[in-house]
Amino acid sequence: MLKLCGVLATRFQKYKAQWRMIRQLDAHEFNRLVIEAFITALAMIMIYFGCVFLIGKLLNPSPTDFARTWQLKERLGITQDMVVWGRSVFTFMMLIISLWFIRWRLVRRYRHIELRHLLKELDYIADGHYEHRISENLVGRLGSVALSINKLVDSTLAAMEEERLVEQTKNELIANVSHDIRTPLTSVIGYLGLLEDKQYENEEELAQYIHIAYIKSQQMKKLSDNLFEYIRVHNYKENLNYQTISINHFLTQIAAEYEVEALNLNMQIYVDVHPEYLTMRIDAEKMARVYDNLLSNAFKYSRATEIHLIARVVDNFIELRVENNGDKIHAEALGKLFTRFFREEQSRSSQTGGTGLGLSIVESIVHLHQGQVYAESDCQKTVFIIRLKKHI
């Protein structure tokens, strides 16, 4: 009983929706439906009376056909009561068939109207109104067609937006690279021009000009290298050379490589891996580049005294943390750290030595390892967290 009630309720909702849609038709379309119903009903009435006439003619023949028809009635055993009953049954069946046929014709006509609406709305969308969506409350398969069209429009809009962002990113990339190259290049050209014109007073001044030009050239080379590395890991999705390594040995080696530089900055690097035998499957060369960028940032910007390289198992992930007790990163900058060419100081001064690509390269390499990276910062510490699956 409950199942029957559910079916009836579904049917009721369906017919209610269809009636609501019919009410949304304009006067011309509604009149066409009414005319269609009237013509169909008239045709069925004519068929009904034609059949009644033929049957009546058969059962009540003219005198010339009386004997032959009477013999037929006798053979079939047809009585007058049976004739009355048969006529009633026939009338009822014709009524049911007529109602079904009228409904079928109306639905068919309504589908044609909906199809015209569908084509009109498609033309409207094609004219540039991409925010418009076609109603999915259509009869039969047209509802599925409308749903598919809306999905197609959504995917097309997403592709157009992605293309727009790619174009915007390309323009920003060109602008930022041009900006970061122009300053050292101008200096190089300027000092080389002084040398070319021999505008120096002594050998000491000559050596100074050459040294400055060399430093500026190194800055341009560093930017070029970082840009190439970023494009390689971000766009080409190169294959990784996976190796299963000991995390403790890996981080200890990283700490040893940067120990002298850290001591010169009055920093200490600590390694903390738990459990000590923990291993992970990574591209060691690429992951070493990640730590190189994170440690270089800490050396340049954090003004910390301690840097901790930590590895832990959290749920089903290996969590690698690079912590320092240096300056807090402002909240508005925290979410933009991994954006290419972003610097927390907006002057883009070469004095800080950064290109704004280091953390973007970090994010790209971590994504290649199917992991995620993010940063947290407060007054006590700043931490960069890398989460990798235990088994990639």
Image: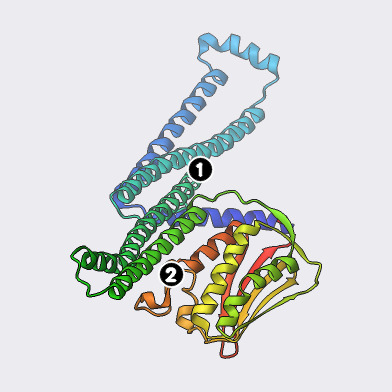
Above or below, comparing residue 369 to residue 207 in the picture: above
Q: Nearer the viewer, mark 2 or mark 1?
A: 2
Q: What is the crowding at mark 1: few (fewer than 14 residues within 10 Å), some, or many (at least 20)?
A: few
Q: Amino acid at mark 2?
A: Gly
Q: Is residue 391 visible?
A: no
Identify the residue position indicated by label 1 in the image. 141
How far from the left and from the top, in percent, is residue 126?
31, 48
10 Å crowding of disc 2: few (<14), some (14-19), many (20+) = many
Instruction: Identify the image quadrant of the C terminus.
Output: bottom right
Find residue 269 and name its label. Answer: none
Could you tell me the amino acid type at mark 1? Arg
Q: Is residue 308 above or below residue 276?
A: below
Residue sitting farthest toward the front = 203
Closer to us: 45 or 102: 102
Q: Is residue 243 left or right of residue 25?
A: right
Q: Nearer the viewer, residue 385 or 28?
A: 385
- Left or right: 192 as drawn, with respect to 311: left
Give coordinates of residue 198: x percent, y percent.
Answer: 20, 67
Residue 347 spot, x, y in % from top left: 34, 78
